Image (cartoon, rainbow, N blue to C red):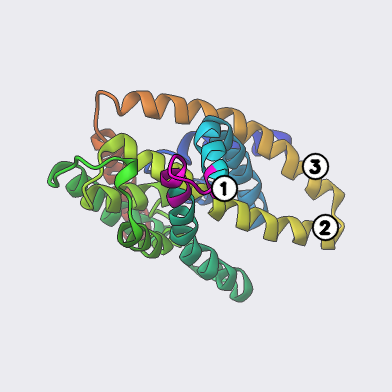
């Protein structure tokens, strides 16, 4: 695979993974735009792994505290221990469902039509949730009920165009969490999900013995890591003074263009 092509894919992933516009949709659309073969799920997972490294470094304090809380259960660390367990519970549905997606090969859902409709529908839901619900809850207010609800609905992220971060933010906003908390919980939930997918696909690379594919995996991950980290930092700063509306506008524009391409052009 051409090195320039991998660089562009990794940059697209890094920029779009943690904003609510669906990185997987963009990774599918780009090859179609330039009439290049779909890079497949392995390269998708490689660039997602770069994003995983970025979020782990950005949230290293939260991760360290959670693991400390889960090891030394006492009054001081109970909240962190509880958050660790709730993240595992919220991640279980998407990891469980993702296993069967991988086994039974649902590549047919990676169509332009699916992306277009999901981009529009979930963009509208994001706008409504961001503007018409009371939002006062913080990370410490997440409980078993909210974690399960978010975790189950997160399964919809397997539909390209939905956006995993977007659907988590949408449901978190509906449940009453403020913008920074919604994004931060989305970042935390991404860790088990991406880690599970990366482990599964890495084992496939090992069994295939494709060294070149392994090199592409590492290179794509590195570029994705750099741009993912930049994206997280900028997004967290953005949410201190603004809303998700610009991303909704982009989703409406992209979804409309794609529907015109599917049904008219």
Q: Quick one: label 3 or label 2, which is nearer the N terminus?
A: 2
| 62 relative to 167, above or below | above
* SS under mark 1: helix
The residue carrying mark 3 is 215
How many numbered discs, if any?
3
Q: Which residue is nearer to you in this view: 23 or 197?
A: 197
* SS under mark 2: helix
> Crowdedness of circle 3 by 10 Å Cα count: few (<14), some, many (20+)?
few
Position of the N terminus, as image quadrant, is top right
> Crowdedness of circle 1 by 10 Å Cα count: few (<14), some, many (20+)?
some
Q: Which residue is nearer to you in this view: 146 or 165?
A: 146
Which tag is nearer the camera, tag 1 or tag 2?
A: 2
Q: Is residue 136 visible?
A: yes
Assess whether residue 77 is covered by the magenta stretch. Answer: yes
The magenta stretch is: 69-82
Find the residue positioned furthest to the front. Answer: 75
Query: At 23% from the left edge and 36% from the top edge, which residue is drawn?
Result: 245
Q: Which mark is residue 31?
A: 1
The residue carrying mark 2 is 206
64 lies left or right of 262: right
Q: Quick one: label 1 or label 2, which is nearer the N terminus?
A: 1
Q: Which residue is nearer to you in this view: 233 or 245?
A: 233
Task: Provide residue 95's location: percent of width, then percent of height.
Answer: 54, 63
Position of the C terminus, as image quadrant, is bottom left
Query: At 33% from the left edge and 43% from the top edge, which residue is drawn?
Result: 140
| 230 relative to 65, above or below | above
Q: Which mark is residue 172?
A: none
């Amino acid at each position: 695979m051409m090195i320039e092509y991998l660089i562009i894919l990794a940059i697209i992933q890094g920029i779009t993974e943690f904003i609510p516009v669906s990185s997987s949709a963009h990774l599918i659309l780009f090859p179609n735009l330039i009439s290049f073969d779909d890079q497949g799920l392995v390269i998708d997972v490689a660039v997602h792994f770069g994003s995983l490294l970025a979020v782990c470094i950005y949230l290293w304090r939260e991760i360290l505290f959670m693991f400390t809380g889960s090891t030394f259960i006492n009054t001081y660390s109970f909240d962190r221990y509880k958050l660790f367990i709730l993240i595992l519970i919220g991640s279980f549905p998407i990891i469980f469902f993702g296993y069967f997606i991988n086994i039974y090969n649902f590549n047919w859902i990676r169509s332009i039509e699916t992306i277009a409709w999901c981009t529009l529908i979930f963009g509208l839901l994001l706008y409504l949730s961001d503007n018409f619900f009371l939002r006062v809850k913080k990370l410490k207010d997440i409980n078993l009920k909210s974690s399960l609800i978010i975790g189950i609905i997160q399964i919809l992220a397997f539909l390209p165009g939905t956006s995993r971060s977007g659907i988590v933010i949408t449901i978190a906003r509906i449940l009453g969490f403020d913008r920074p908390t919604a994004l931060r919980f989305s970042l935390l939930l991404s860790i088990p999900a991406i880690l599970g997918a990366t482990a599964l696909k890495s084992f496939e690379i090992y069994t295939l013995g494709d060294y070149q594919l392994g090199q592409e995996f590492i290179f794509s991950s590195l570029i994705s890591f750099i741009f993912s980290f930049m994206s997280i930092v900028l997004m967290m700063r953005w949410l201190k003074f603004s809303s998700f509306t610009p991303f909704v506008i982009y989703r409406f524009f992209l979804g409309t263009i794609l529907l015109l391409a599917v049904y008219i052009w």
